Image (tube, rainbow, N blue to C red):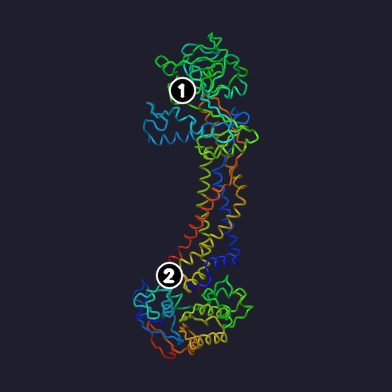
């Protein structure tokens, strides 16, 4: 190879000495880079939400099921079954005679995964943890429940609620001071088949500590097996516990505290528990934030969960927040494709003005490959400078784009909620309002790497496409255009 | 040095119109050739084939006894021939020195001095030089490749009479002192008169290769 100036030298001189064109291209690639950055950053954004009634206490964190992921998993199960009746991954699908589809889930679908809970509990800085089951509605066999004589119970399930805890003293209603056990004791992790009932329920049925209550499945009241739980304590209500749904089955006095594994038995799902919350307390309050960071790094399926901190904030990953993930992906694809087209057109236009130069290079013995390599190098150099500039601007821009997208999502959800309210007249489930407190985007190493690869890909695709005319023409044809 | 062996060329869309019709000729080193002919006589095609910018439909072009297609056209353009154009064809974002370096030799400054480009001019933007100076830079670039054959397409077409005379003189020196094979395609009678051999192309054939033939 005899050529006296290498590709890098030529590319650098071309860019430096043709400033107007360079600045134009640099500006375009810079804007594209910024949006590519924003797209990737939004995909990994954390949306901090606060839900009324979901505030955690003290120096603790709470883990809950993520609604969006639940929705996604249901959709996956439907797809897996391909429009047939059947079961997949804890989802059951059946077509009714009316033609409508009925979908229900078993506990394995809904529950927090024990191995994930234990992984978080094992993290450094965690002092203790508690697991709480969902309120399981079961049929009271040998006692009667508290009823409001003024309420129409026809649509109620005519049951009581069981709430299992690994450590009852760590239940959020006990911690909040809503209930106090003044007779007997609380349930511990060592207990099996025990319960603590309300003072009102005990008085109505003449029950004392040591008595046994029997429960069975609400669906098969006459035939299903009844399970006994011994009363080990009686609680007094200071503030009524918030019911999760309307109806006396869920009223505060009818909530019976049990050990962790009891509720699944009368529910008819022995061995298939439904853990709704896991709460983790930190050892040293001063290290709360550090422990939080540590926990967030734990290798569990975070997509499945919401993680709520002591301010009631829940860090929801972008992929679980409405269509944020989808919208970020759409931005990325749109920016990448339109960016590639714009850069392609700019380079094509540029090359039309460089026919003379290309012809000269070919005439002095450079190959087409070398000519294209120089164009590529120019694109890459511009891409590098744009990328560095975009890296400086990316955090602020990402934050703003994510804020905008989240705001748009919240607005959409609100409108959808209002529309659904008008159509159905409510679902009977008590709904808490979730407020978005902030959006946290982080330009991590991964985001930088992904952005760099995307920008490089866009530039290479655009430049190589625009170089097609060099490849397709004979040197003589190019030279004939020079004069 | 450079040889055309039974070379024919026509456009695929116009097979009945031969641009070059079974042309055979051997160009020798140390000789300055002038190729004359009316427009459309095939002068530029002949130059393109000799330069390896295009390939003949029939026949072969050989450099130092070897078919240039076998060696590769890029390699042929790089090692065997260097080109000088009517409109100079310098790279506008490079200085004269850098343009010459494109040719491939480190002694660009020396070559430019030989061509009469002074230090001040070497630092200026190449587009700020006069036509004659630009053509000198273009010749310096052609010499930088050390190729034994110099092909020139109307090299004095854009130059005034005095400057054209200087360029012709350079070509003569290159042929006679540096043993280059200089092939100049031209309409210029003055240039042709200075050549050692004049080739006249007519209807795709070399009609004469001695002295100037009237059109």
Q: Is A463 rendered above or below residue B81?
A: above
Image position, residue A362 (x, y; %): 47, 71
Q: Are marks 2 and 1 on the same chain?
A: yes
Q: Is A226 rendered above or below residue B48?
A: above
**Taking the image as drawn, is residue A479 in sight?**
no
Q: Residue at x 59, y 46 (%)?
A: A398
Which residue occupies the extreme right position in the image? A286
Q: Which residue is mark 2?
A: A474
Of residue A164 and residue A16, the one placed in the foreground of this image is A164
Image position, residue A140 (x, y; %): 48, 14
Q: Which residue is mark 1?
A: A264
Image position, residue B148 (x, y; %): 46, 81
Badge 2 density bin: few <14, some 14–19, many ≥20, Cα 10 Å: some
Which residue occupies the extreme top position in the image? A206
**Taking the image as drawn, is residue A334 in sight?**
yes
Q: Chain of mark 2?
A: A
Q: Residue at x 57, y 12 (%)?
A: A200
Q: What SS does tag 1 mark?
A: helix
Badge 1 density bin: few <14, some 14–19, many ≥20, Cα 10 Å: many
Q: Residue at x 45, y 78 (%)?
A: B81
Between disc 2 and disc 1, whose residue precedes? Answer: 1
Q: Chain of mark 1?
A: A
Occupied quadrant, residue A270:
top left
Badge nearest the viewer, 2 or 1: 1
On screen, residue A101 versus residue A446, left or right, reads: left
Q: What SS does tag 2 mark?
A: loop
Image position, residue B56 (x, y; %): 37, 75
């Amino acid at each position: 190879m005899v050529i006296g100036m290498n590709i890098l030298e030529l590319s650098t001189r071309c860019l430096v000495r043709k400033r107007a064109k360079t600045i134009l291209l640099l500006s375009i690639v810079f804007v594209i880079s910024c949006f590519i950055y924003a797209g990737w950053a939004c995909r990994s954004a954390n949306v901090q939400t606060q839900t009324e009634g979901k505030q955690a206490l003290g120096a603790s964190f709470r883990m809950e099921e993520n609604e969006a992921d639940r929705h996604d998993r249901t959709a996956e199960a439907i797809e897996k079954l391909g429009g047939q009746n059947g079961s997949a991954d804890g989802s059951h699908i059946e077509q009714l005679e009316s033609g409508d589809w009925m979908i229900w889930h078993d506990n394995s679908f809904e529950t927090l995964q024990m191995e994930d809970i234990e992984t978080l509990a094992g993290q450094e800085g965690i002092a203790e943890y508690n697991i709480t089951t969902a309120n399981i509605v079961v049929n009271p066999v040998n006692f009667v429940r508290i009823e409001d004589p003024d309420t129409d119970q026809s649509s109620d399930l005519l049951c009581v609620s069981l709430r299992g805890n690994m450590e009852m003293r760590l239940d959020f209603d006990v911690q909040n001071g809503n209930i106090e056990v003044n007779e007997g004791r609380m349930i511990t992790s060592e207990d099996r088949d025990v319960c603590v009932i309300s003072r009102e329920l005990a008085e109505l049925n003449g029950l004392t500590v040591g008595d046994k209550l029997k429960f069975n499945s609400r669906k098969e009241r006459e035939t299903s097996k009844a399970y006994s739980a011994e009363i080990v304590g009686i609680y007094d209500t200071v503030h009524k516990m918030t019911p999760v749904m309307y109806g006396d089955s869920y009223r505060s006095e009818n909530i019976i505290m049990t050990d962790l594994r009891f509720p699944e038995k009368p529910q008819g799902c022995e061995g298939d528990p439904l853990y709704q919350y896991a709460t983790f307390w930190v050892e040293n309050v001063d290290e709360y934030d550090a422990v939080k960071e540590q926990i967030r790094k734990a290798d569990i399926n975070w997509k499945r969960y919401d993680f709520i901190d002591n301010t009631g904030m829940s860090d929801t990953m972008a992929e679980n927040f409405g269509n944020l993930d989808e919208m970020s992906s759409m931005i990325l694809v749109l920016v990448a494709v339109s960016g590639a087209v714009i850069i392609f057109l700019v380079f094509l236009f540029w090359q039309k003005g460089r026919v003379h130069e290309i012809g000269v290079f070919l005439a002095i013995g450079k190959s087409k490959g070398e000519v294209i390599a120089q164009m590529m190098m120019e694109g890459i150099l511009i891409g590098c400078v744009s990328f560095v500039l975009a890296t400086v601007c990316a955090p602020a821009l990402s934050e703003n784009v994510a804020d905008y997208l989240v705001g748009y999502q919240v607005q959409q959800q609100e409108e959808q909620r209002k529309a659904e309210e008008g159509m159905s007249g409510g679902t009977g489930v008590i709904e808490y309002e979730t407020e978005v407190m902030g959006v946290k985007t982080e330009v991590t190493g991964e985001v930088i790497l992904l952005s760099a690869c995307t920008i490089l890909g866009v530039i290479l695709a655009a430049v190589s496409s625009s170089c097609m005319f060099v490849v397709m023409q004979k040197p003589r044809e190019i030279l004939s255009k020079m004069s | 040095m450079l040889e055309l062996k039974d070379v024919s060329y026509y456009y695929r869309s116009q097979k009945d119109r031969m641009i070059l019709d079974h042309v055979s000729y051997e160009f020798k080193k140390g000789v300055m050739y002038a190729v004359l002919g009316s427009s459309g006589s095939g002068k530029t095609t002949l130059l393109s084939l000799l330069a390896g910018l295009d390939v003949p439909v029939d026949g072969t072009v050989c450099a130092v006894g070897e078919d240039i297609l076998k060696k590769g056209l890029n390699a042929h353009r790089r090692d065997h021939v260097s080109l000088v154009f009517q409109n100079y064809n310098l790279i506008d974002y490079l200085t004269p020195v850098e343009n010459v370096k494109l040719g491939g030799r480190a002694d660009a400054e020396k070559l430019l001095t030989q061509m009469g480009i002074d230090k001040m001019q070497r630092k200026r933007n190449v587009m700020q030089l006069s036509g004659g100076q630009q053509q000198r830079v273009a010749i310096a670039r052609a010499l930088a490749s050390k190729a034994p054959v110099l092909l020139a397409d109307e090299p004095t077409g854009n130059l005034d009479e005095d400057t054209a005379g200087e360029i012709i003189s350079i070509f003569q020196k290159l042929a006679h002192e540096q043993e280059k094979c200089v092939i100049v395609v031209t309409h210029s009678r003055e240039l042709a008169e200075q050549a050692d051999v004049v080739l006249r192309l007519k209807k795709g054939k070399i009609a004469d290769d001695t002295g100037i033939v009237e059109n």
